[in-house]
Image (cartoon, helix red, strand yellow):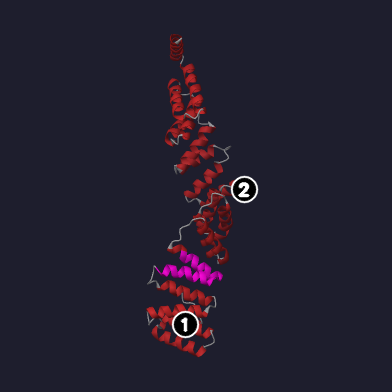
Amino acid sequence: MKKILTIVTLCVYSFAQANPADSSNFYYLKGLEEKKAKRFQVASLQFDKSIAFNPNNTEALLENAYTNLEMRKTDQAKMFFSKVYQINPSNKQAIKELMNIYYNYRQFDKAVELAKKCVDCSESQRIIGMSSYHQEDYTTAEAYLKPYLDKNVNDAEATYTLARTYIDMEETKKAIPYMERAVKLPIAKAVWMYEQAILLYEMNDYKNSVAAFSNAVEHGYTQSLDFNENYGFACLYSGDYEKGEKLIMSVLGKKTGNKDLLRGLAEVLYQQKQFDRSLFYCQKLIELDAKDGKALYQAGLCFQKKGEKDRGQAMCDKAIEIDPSLESLKRKKDLSFM
């Protein structure tokens, strides 16, 4: 029985050698069987044999490319897709896959070139839009991403990229709704939530900015010193003074000589009509530097707002003696010197 099987195998092999096209198809079918069984390495070897008999077997080339993608061998997959593209420049499968591979390799010019050939591909608008953003061609990015997102509302990465496009175009109002959509999608990243918080802060929407900061923390964003400083001031402006002061003081605990933070606290609290709180930080500034005219002037303004006008005016006058540049504030009745 073993002899018979050996003879049959030799006959098949001899037939395959004599008929390259049939041999290519024989190994191609073997490759499909192995691929279906998820034995990808073996499948790829069978497809290699098929291609060796017929280098123009596009079906074997494509299957070998997809098999290598399964094994995360992207360079090998790219090589096989490229061979198909060389044989048939209109092959939609090769164009589509190469378009995505080139985009992932950040070869944006090539990705756009292929996307423009893949007019029926659902992802072509996305690829052109995303690539254009990375190439700082924001007008083109907007032109392609907006219609794409009208049909693909759950694409978080593209939604975020359109938001970033508007940010880089310095059109913040247009960016906000797309960033809001992006952070609500399942694969949203904590850093997007932080960026949303900063956007809202810059638009003076402090209540929603605080909510975005909190959302970023809940999703694991690292509370760096810069993060806590921004979060703290958003809290202060939104009226949550206790939390805001706590966050800013946590930063000051590590930046003990940072007078700007103390001055910022005093200024914001003054603007928020929290005069006693503002005075507390003015005093800290004066303790650090008895000749800090700005802090003394700020304290004087606080006393005036508290109803102690004579005392406050005397402090402002003393501050001007220390720092004559403050005279301009008095003339202009400008209560801010930040």
Q: Label 2 sits on what residue type?
A: Asp
Place of residue 102 in the rendered image (x, y in percent of width and height, measured from the top left): 46, 40
Magenta residue span: 228-253
Q: In the image, what residue type sits under mark 1? A: Ala
Name the residue beneath numbered marker 1: 299
Q: Residue at (46%, 26%) from the top-left corner?
A: 43
**Label 2 SS:** helix
The reply, left or right, for residue 115 in relation to residue 225 is right
Closest to the camera, between mark 2 and mark 1, is: 1
Q: Nearer the viewer, residue 159 or 6?
A: 6
Residue 68 % position (x, y): 46, 32
Q: Identify the mark at residue 87; answer none if there is no mark.
A: none
Left-right relation of 84 to 205 = left
Q: Residues within 10 Å of mark 2 (few under 14, many from 20)?
A: few
Mark 1 lies on a secondary structure that is helix
Q: Residue furthest right?
A: 151
Tell whether position 294 is magenta: no
Q: Residue at x 49, y 16 (%)?
A: 22
* Alpha-carbon span between mark 2 and mark 1: 54 Å
- The mark nearer the N terminus, 2 or 1, is 2
Q: For the stretch drawn in magenta, what is the main secondary structure? A: helix
* Location of residue 2 with respect to 76 vertically, above or below: above
Q: Which residue is mark 2?
A: 150
In the image shown, does 230 or 100 lie closer to the viewer?
A: 230
The question of residue 232 being in magenta is answered with yes
Identify whether 49 is placed above or below 333.
Answer: above
Task: Residue 320 in the image: state x and y as whole percent.
Answer: 42, 85
